[in-house]
């Protein structure tokens, strides 16, 4: 009895670009949220004269991040992706029956979080400003 070569060696699957982005957001958006919450506590404890605009800005960004995270989790669930956390920057992810190890270097994660927070900050307007 002969076994075909394809049956012996199964080539690993590659994640699609959409799956890569979902995994990245699933892992790194909670870090962005924690960073903003920590910053918000620092603003409240600071001696700033006008804290309200900064608190308003961080509140708006936290709402947007929470909304994005909910969408990411919904989409990951729809695609039957499973995440198992090893630590903040290391996860085992199961996608389409395949196991993937996702690890992020702290500097790469910090850069991603900084860029994400900046992207939320740019379109922000106070309620009394003209648009």
Image (cartoon, grey):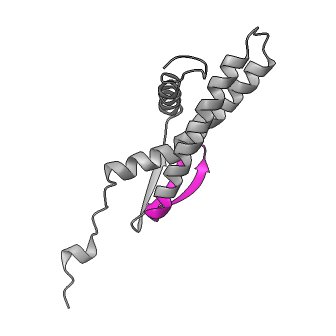
Query: Residue at coordinates 59% horizontally, 20% vertically from top-left?
Result: 126
Percent from the top left, x then y, of residue 3? Answer: 21, 83
Residue 55: x %, y % from top left: 69, 23
Task: Say whether residue 28 is left or right of residue 46.
Answer: left
**Span shown in magenta:** 76-94
Front residue of 82/6: it is: 82
Residue at the image position 61 percent from the left and 18 percent from the top = 128
The location of residue 87, given as percent across then percent down, is 61, 47
For residue 6, above or below residue 116: below
Query: Quick check: 34 left or right of 119?
Result: right
Q: Is residue 115 above or below residue 69?
A: above
Quarter of the image where the N terminus is located: bottom left
In the rendered image, residue 18 lying in the magenta stretch gets the answer no
Residue 42 placement: quadrant: top right
Residue 31 in view: no
Taking the image as shown, residue 79 lies to the left or right of residue 120, namely: left
Magenta segment includes 85: yes
Residue 29 against residue 59 in the figure, above or below: below
Which residue appears at 56% of the width and 37% of the height? 64
The residue lying toward the viewer, choosing from 49 and 8, is 49
Q: Is residue 85 visible?
A: yes
């Amino acid at each position: 009895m002969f076994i075909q070569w394809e049956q012996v060696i199964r080539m690993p699957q590659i994640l699609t670009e959409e799956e890569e982005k979902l995994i990245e957001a699933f892992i790194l958006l909670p870090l962005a949220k924690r960073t903003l919450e920590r910053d918000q506590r620092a603003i409240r404890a600071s001696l700033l004269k006008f804290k309200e605009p900064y608190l308003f800005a961080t509140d708006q960004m936290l709402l947007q991040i929470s909304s994005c995270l909910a969408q990411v989790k919904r989409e990951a669930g729809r695609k039957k992706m499973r995440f198992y956390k090893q630590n903040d920057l290391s996860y085992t992810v199961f996608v389409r029956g395949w196991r993937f190890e996702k690890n992020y270097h702290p500097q790469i994660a910090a850069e991603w979080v900084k860029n994400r927070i900046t992207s939320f900050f740019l379109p922000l307007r106070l309620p009394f400003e003209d648009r």
